[in-house]
Image (cartoon, coloured by chain):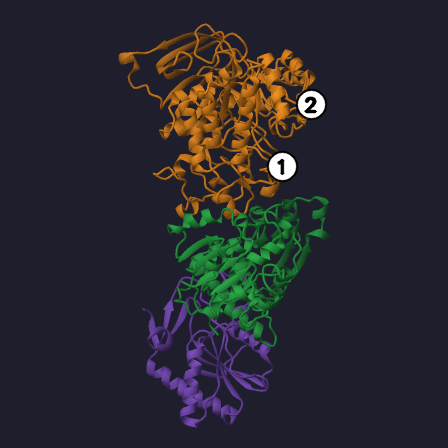
Chain colours: A purple, B green, C orange
Amino acid sequence: MDGRQIMTADEIRRAIIRISHELVEKQAGTEGLVLVGIQRRGVPLAHRIAVAVHEHEGVTLPVGALDITFYRDDLSLIAQQPVVKGTQLPVDLNGRTVVLVDDVLYTGRTIRAAMDALVDFGRPRAIRLAVLVDRGHRELPIRADHVGKNVPTSSDEVVAVTLVEIDGEDAVRIERVDAPARTA
Amino acid sequence: MNVSNAPTLPDVAWRQKHLLDVDVLSLAEIQLVMRTTDAMKEVLARPISKVPALRGTNVTILFYEASTRTRVSFEVAAKNLSADVVNIAASSSSVTKGESLVDTIRTVEALGADMIVMRHGTSGAPYLAAEVFAGSILNGGDGWHAHPSQALLDLYTMRAHLGDVRGKKVVILGDVLHSRVARSNVWSLTAAGADLWICGPTTILRGFDAWARRWAGGGAPGHAGFTVTSDVDAALRDADVVMALRLQRERMDAGLLPSLREYAARFGLTRERLAIAKPTALVMHPGPMNEGVEIAPDVAVLDRSVITEQVTNGVAVRMALLYLLAGGHPEAVTNA
Amino acid sequence: MPDLRVGETVQLLEISRAWLVDPVGEREGPGEIVVRDGILESVTWLQGDEAEGIGPGGVLVLPGFLDIHVHLREPGNEDAETVASGLAAAAHGGFTTVCAMPNTTPAADEPGVLARVAGAAAASGSPVELLAHGAVTVGRAGERLAALGELADAGAVGFSDDGSPVKSAVLLRNALLYAGMLGLPIVEHAEDATLTAGAEANEGLVATILGLKGWPAAAEVSAVERAIAILESVLADSPGARLHVTHLSTAGALDAVRRAKAAGLPVTCDVTPHHLGFTDEWVAGARRWAWEALDDAGAARDPWADGALVAHPYATACRVNPPLRGATDAAACLASLADGTADAVVTDHAPHTAVDKETEFGLAANGISGVEMAFGVLLAAVTAGRLPLARAVAALTVGPAAVLGARPGRRGAARGLVEGAPADLVVVDAGDRWRVTGDALLSRGKNTPLLGRELPGRILLTVAQGRVAYRDADA
């Protein structure tokens, strides 16, 4: 893959450890926390954060996966229906603090869709957001509570996150493309 | 959660504008329907079993034949996707005043339909509708010809219990001549590699033997077998799935069968006959049932009867199909 | 080509270096013709160097065609076709004489209706000659014989209840006896209606897969055998009795006629271009010619397995009575032309309005609009090596003329390239092609599955009784 690399595997690892400390600190503990990874790459990231929390707190947080395909606001605009990956939530969300986990925060539309999906499952006490990369260009009033790295980008660039669990390696790269960038 | 234990093919994009029959679906597309149905089953298991995927889409259900279960199944499916549903039952519409099918489709389109789910008593009617309608047509059953959503929910149900139907012996028992469920199942089961058997009295097997012999040379890709026989014992022996079909009384010519009693005696699915199949064999029926004719009442309620599960799966499969069809706009902007 | 206008007598037409086919003289080859003041003045056969480079793939000069089975719909269904539009369409197809079937509204069961149809032909100004069959029974209802003698006196060339068979065996017998006395044939649409109630498509693999009610071959075969048996039984009392079974579509029916002819019975039959050229595959969406749908062993192929489906299934333009059959039956129709069992090709031209056809397959009217495409379909068979050109031409000319019992000089005459006779001919460019479109068709009936397809051979000029009946705009 070409494009310039902006995070190495080690940087990703340290960011995840820092995020895991931050979210425990914000919660003043681990009570009531649920990590929900947004399909697709948010899911392994959520699992890694849970492992990190276990290492320094000794507690295993529940981890779920959320597919927001049905909640996208652009379904009528795209050529074919995107393939659904599936949602699995291990616990009841009522009264819990849900930390959504995604790889890249961009326009904010994915997070908007994720929140719509979550409230169909119950009424969380709070919803927070942890992302590996925040690339700016918000189109909705959404902000992340925990950020691995802030990366200023232009709209003709794509931020490509690769993870060992899915792509075989850990890296974050920026690539320049001519097509419209994806909404994330 | 994932019932697709079969070797998965890579993700394929859904490109069909209409779903008129399963004969045009590749195995990869069928697998895509199965996977999407998994996701829909998860949605149905939620406390609020509704997603906004088809919000703003008008789904018009146009049924020219009386049917409660299929029509309601489609209605529930469309509403679970937050679509706007319009229900037209032919007997209450201007159809009875003699409006042609083409004019009815044009009227429905002018009223804002984006998708039409239609059931019609004449084979081929949805193909005519697809020629005049700008949106998508989902065939809810046409004459004797096809019932794609039923075949797909049948396949989904079988896979949920058997994992993969490849090489499994599936028997369709009953009035296949007049059955669109049978024809569509022939396409989907042979594509999925099942060992398909069709059984019934010779008068209502007419034509299927020639079909089976034509495909026996490998005409249909992937199939393990396609046998047509009136020997019930041979058909049921060691079967993994037995699907009983309704005797289509209202479609039958006078003189195809001596009597229903004789049919029940020679071909009805009773406990004794079912014992010839595997002890774990699934019992299926598309409904509604003529209990005591093609299926004995005590067989219909056995544990391994999945007849009610077919109904639940039917909603999920139809949600999956509506979802996939709603995306068929190749001229739209790609903004994924 | 000189300035020739439709309707006008041909002052002078010289065609040199063309391939001539004369089925009367049983001769074909390079030649030249000259037409002067409406008469075919000279027919010259070329030899040696002069004949160099002239073949049947170029310009053909043929005798004008005769179609003994068309439906002109007037009176009663002028939206589908009128006599005028039908004759114009016939001329476009190379036909200089057509014979109209009597299933109009009212049916042609008495001389007044025949006179009306003849009047419409005269009023149209078309040089195409119009012959007519009378109905066998009053109203074609199958209960009482129509006024056969009066119809014969008024010019009927035969009798038919076409659209339907003659409903009862006893009536068919009486009709054969009576018409035999008049020296005219009974043209029977052979169908056992009890076997075809509700039938939609040929009983076979395609009907099974498409969920259409089957139309068994036995319905035609048994009806033909019945009719032949009845004919045989009346010959002693009516030696002039003649039976013509029309639009045969099955090998079994053609075999029955073959056996009857071998036994010396006065039976004739015809086949249509759609029964020899198309198959029931077309209902599933195939558009390959019938001879392309056969494998090397002579068995029908599977269009699904072959990927041969190129059009929408259930096209109502494919719905016809008798139905399009399987490839082996179509091959039998073609073979029957080659061996003479089939005396003629007819089009059974059956124009329908869009309203009657743009509906569900099971509800659509039966019939294919075919008079303009007939020669193109036959030429496709000729080009594919399935039929000699001479046989194709004979089946459109001397064959049907013999069925009517015509003699030279009478109406429905000789059908050859006869020097000194009024010019009655067709000029075709066999090397060109034409696309069948709604605009290109002169018939009001656009109900043909060939719409949008190309056919070999372009008809350049049709001359009927010395006058121009059709002329290609670009010729």
Tell which of C143 and C282 is nearer to you.
C143
Q: Position of residue B314 (x, y in %)?
A: 57, 64
Disc 2 chain ID:
C
Residue that mark 2 sits on: C144
Residue located farthest toward the left when viewing the structure as drawn: C49
Residue that mark 1 sits on: C356
Q: Does C384 appear above or below B222?
A: above
- The disc, 1 or 2, on the residue closer to the chain's N-terminal end is 2
Give the mark count. Answer: 2
For mark 2, does the 10 Å Cα neighbourhood hold few (<14), some (14 to 19), or many (20 or more) residues? Answer: few
Mark 2: amino acid: Arg
- SS for tag 2? loop
For mark 1, does the 10 Å Cα neighbourhood hold few (<14), some (14 to 19), or many (20 or more) residues? Answer: some
Q: Does B56 appear above or below C160?
A: below
Mark 1: amino acid: Asp
Disc 1 chain ID:
C
Image quarter of residue B254:
top right
Tell which of C203 and A173 is nearer to you.
C203
Image quarter of residue C384:
top left
Q: Position of residue C67 (x, y in %)?
A: 52, 21
Q: Position of residue C86 (x, y in %)?
A: 58, 24
Q: Position of residue A108 (x, y in %)?
A: 51, 74
